[in-house]
Image (cartoon, rainbow, N blue to C red):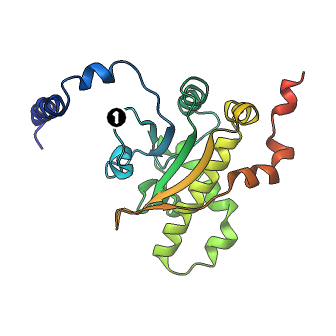
Amino acid sequence: MHFDEIFKNNENWIAQKLELNPDYFHDLSKGQSPEFLYIGCSDSRVTAEDLMGLKPGEVFIHRNIANQVIPTDNNVNAVVQYAVEHLKVKHIIICGHYECGGVKAALNPSDMGQLNSWLQTLRDVRRLHKKELEKIQDPQKLFDRLVELNVREQCMNIIKIDHVQKSWYKTGFPQIHGWVFDVRTGKLIDLGLNMEQEFMEVRDIYDLKPLDKK
């Protein structure tokens, strides 16, 4: 696609929206009240609204390489805080995808310059689940499984965040979900994680509620 075509596409998109609803952009400018925070991969093949069938204003989105939730990343922490405290989202979704380049890089270590520090978290996921992964002989199944385990670990990183825990104790929300998008079939797969149970198992390590009592 030629660069200039993007602006022509934008004009066509505006015309289509106004044809269906003359007040579309007026209504859109009034604000947002999404129930979902979607944290996904930056991969150009994975577009959050499209794969969920949602409209603008229905999902708050953060994307980075391999859908990471890194404790020292101010960007993702700011997104989570805003989504939980101000937008009052009911659900946080960590969505990975099969054929993820970041996960593939973690399976095939090499010096990738600036990416090394970012991929370290992914390599830590591989290390944490080394025994399980070493039993998988099929390279494709190994690749897919690391994608799934990465989603689980990023869900775990979400429940460590203070803004999330405080909201849990006050409202019972947000609920945390781990999904995988299968780029080979187009299907969304719910990994069926029970993050409340997961949190209870590590609560003595990560529960921040005692800090509120001081």
Residue beneath the point at 55% across and 64% down? 146
Residue beneath the point at 53% across and 72% down? 142
Using the image as rendered, state which of residue 131 and residue 54 is in the foreground: 54
Position above or below: 122 against 213: below
Using the image as rendered, state which of residue 42 and residue 183 is in the foreground: 183
Label 1 neighbour load within 10 Å: few <14, some 14-19, many 20+: few
Residue 191 percent across, percent down from the top left: 56, 62
Quadrant occupied by the C terminus: top right
Q: Is residue 113 visible?
A: no
Quadrant occupied by the N terminus: top left
Residue beneath the point at 56% across and 42% down? 92
Residue 179 percent across, percent down from the top left: 51, 56
Q: Is residue 154 left or right of residue 180?
A: right
Residue 169 percent across, percent down from the top left: 76, 34
**Local SS, label 1:** loop
Residue lying farthest to the right in this orientation: 214
Question: Where does label 1 land, which residue?
Answer: 56
Position above or below: 178 against 133: above
Position above or below: 46 against 60: below
Using the image as rendered, state which of residue 176 and residue 104 is in the foreground: 176
Q: Is residue 211 visible?
A: yes
Position above or below: 137 against 129: below
Residue beneath the point at 61% across and 47% down? 176
What's the amino acid at mark 1? Pro
Q: Is residue 167 left or right of residue 209?
A: left
Residue 91 percent across, percent down from the top left: 56, 42
Q: How many marks?
A: 1
Quadrant assignment, res 17: top left
